[in-house]
Image (cartoon, coloured by chain):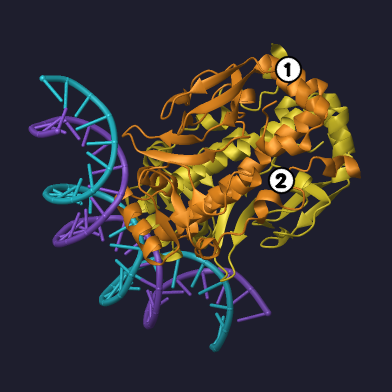
Chain colours: A yellow, B orange, C cyan, D purple
DNA sequence: CGCTGCATTGAAATATCTCAATCAATGTGG
DNA sequence: CCACATTGATTGAGATATTTCAATGCAGCG
């Protein structure tokens, strides 16, 4: 029983069993390895059980723009379920474990379990809300604030799946990854980290990860308010049946 | 019978009737008037029948970041269906007509018509794809290319609902609106329009709208490829039932 | 040891912003 | 029909943020 994250709290035991029963197999992906490429024809979709994945668009000249950072509990390529292809790549940042669902089985599953279908729909709505927050961050924030933004969003999402210990962000993103997320240069990203450290907001650790010293100030700097991640019952599928 | 746009082609007559039968009432909104405010509690959702709406986040200091431009055939606030509130504002650019659905009726409707439920899900997936394209545009493109991007995206989406005549973009967005979409200053937006005109790519008309002279070059400049809007059967809900 | 990958720094080049002024069209009240 | 206000577009010049290019440092690793 290894479904965690977003869906976990909203599903009945029966639904959970049905979902797990529809898993084709589990897949492991090594760090910095691509799982799905843009344009590729898709017949299956993957649910991220463990690890962190990067979703990004790559330009012909090799520059990347991250569009999402997937954490455990996310479906990483549900967009390909109806469209049969993705507009972006999905690759592993850390060692990842995923559950594979063939689209055929998914169709069966979702037509037998409406509530589950809703839950998956709503989880894609949350993805869209996160996308909108990124649009705002790229349009509105300075480079330094963007870096802070990515950090605090990750922390907030880690809290939701109970994987933040209150001090350290363990995700081994490179400065280049932050740069590709924020739409800035890796050189400039480096300077941003320096100023963030000089202000005493965080401390980058050798190896990977960082220690967060002042999350509140990081959030203020990034103009971040976490409501959009939960809202009044975001993902609370029950909201619908209630009335 | 006035449902047009995205959903139209994918629905059976019966579904269309059911959908139309669930409409609470239709609502008219005057230009530059707000329909839904961020944070407000929502009990209904709106489908845009006619007109153009702007969805944007507003910062305390009054600056705006557009996150989406809604065209006829879009649900403008489906995100509020499960979450009961929106993370952004929705307001009319032009005179708009909308169909109002109470969430209660929607729940009934979608549980009676699974196929319809899928269609709505997939339409939100397309929104997310458009969001991702914006993220890329803001992270990767110069100011001039961003302006071109917004223009060509609108044109491509207008083509999908058969509202582009091949030459003129009639949508009365102000330069300030383009600026708020692209995350740049209105002053700079003005300079971008000038250079776009000097290159002979388009001609801004007094009053509103513009004449497009070289759509291909605008697309190249904006690094725009329209596949993500349709893909192999994007929105073709039938894809699922087929196999 | 000598790579290799990543982080760090410096200095000049460029894109974009800010502020302030002007212009052109439109609408309004007298 | 004129005077005037308002709104949006346009221009200029200096300030600032970010990029670019090139070099250096620093660690882990075969």
Residue A192 shown left or right of residue A182 in the figure: left
Q: Identify the chain of the residue marked 1, using the numbered disc in the image.
A: B
Question: Which residue is under mark 2?
Answer: A79
- Quadrant of the rendered image containing residue A163: top right
Q: Nearer the viewer, residue A213 or D9?
A: D9
Residue B109 shown left or right of residue B103 in the figure: right
x and y, in percent, of residue A103 in the image: 85, 45
Question: Whole-Å distance between the Cαs marked 2 and 1?
Answer: 29 Å
x and y, in percent, of residue B82 in the image: 64, 24
Q: Is residue B83 above or below residue A208?
A: above
Q: Identify the chain of the residue marked 2, using the numbered disc in the image.
A: A
Residues at marks 2 and 1 on the same chain: no
x and y, in percent, of residue B186 in the image: 32, 48
Question: Which residue is under mark 1?
Answer: B21
Q: Residues within 10 Å of mark 1 (few under 14, many from 20)?
A: few
Which residue is drawn at the image coordinates 57% and 59% (left, top)? B224
Which residue is drawn at the image coordinates 80% and 54% (left, top)? A42
- Quadrant of the rendered image containing residue B98: top right
Query: Are the residues tagged 2 and 1 within 8 Å (C-beta)?
Result: no
Quadrant the N terminus of chain A occupies: top right
Q: Nearer the viewer, residue B100 or C17?
A: B100
Residue B218 shown left or right of residue C15 in the figure: right
x and y, in percent, of residue B41 in the image: 53, 18
Q: Nearer the viewer, residue A34 or A60?
A: A60
Q: Secondary structure at mark 2?
A: loop
């Amino acid at each position: 029983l290894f479904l965690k994250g977003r869906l976990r709290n909203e599903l009945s035991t029966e639904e959970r069993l049905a979902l797990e029963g529809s898993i084709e197999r589990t897949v492991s992906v090594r760090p910095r390895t691509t799982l799905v490429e843009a344009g590729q024809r898709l017949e299956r979709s993957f649910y991220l059980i463990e690890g962190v994945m990067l979703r990004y668009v790559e330009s012909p000249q090799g520059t990347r723009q991250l569009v999402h950072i997937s954490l455990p509990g996310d479906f990483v390529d549900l967009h390909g379920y109806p469209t049969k292809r993705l507009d972006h790549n999905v690759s592993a940042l850390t060692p990842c474990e995923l559950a594979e669902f063939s689209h055929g089985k998914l169709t069966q599953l979702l037509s037998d379990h409406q509530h589950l279908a809703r839950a998956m729909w709503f989880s894609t709505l949350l993805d869209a809300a996160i996308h909108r927050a990124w649009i705002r961050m790229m349009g509105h924030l300075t480079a330094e604030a963007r870096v802070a933004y990515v950090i605090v969003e990750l922390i907030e999402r880690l809290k939701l799946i109970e994987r933040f210990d209150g001090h350290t962000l363990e995700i081994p993103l490179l400065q280049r990854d932050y740069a590709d997320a924020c739409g800035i240069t890796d050189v400039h990203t480096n300077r941003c980290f320096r100023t963030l450290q000089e202000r005493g907001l965080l401390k980058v650790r050798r190896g990977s990860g960082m220690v967060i010293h002042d999350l509140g100030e990081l959030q203020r700097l990034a103009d971040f308010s976490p409501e959009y991640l939960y809202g009044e019952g975001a993902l609370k599928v029950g909201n619908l049946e209630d009335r």
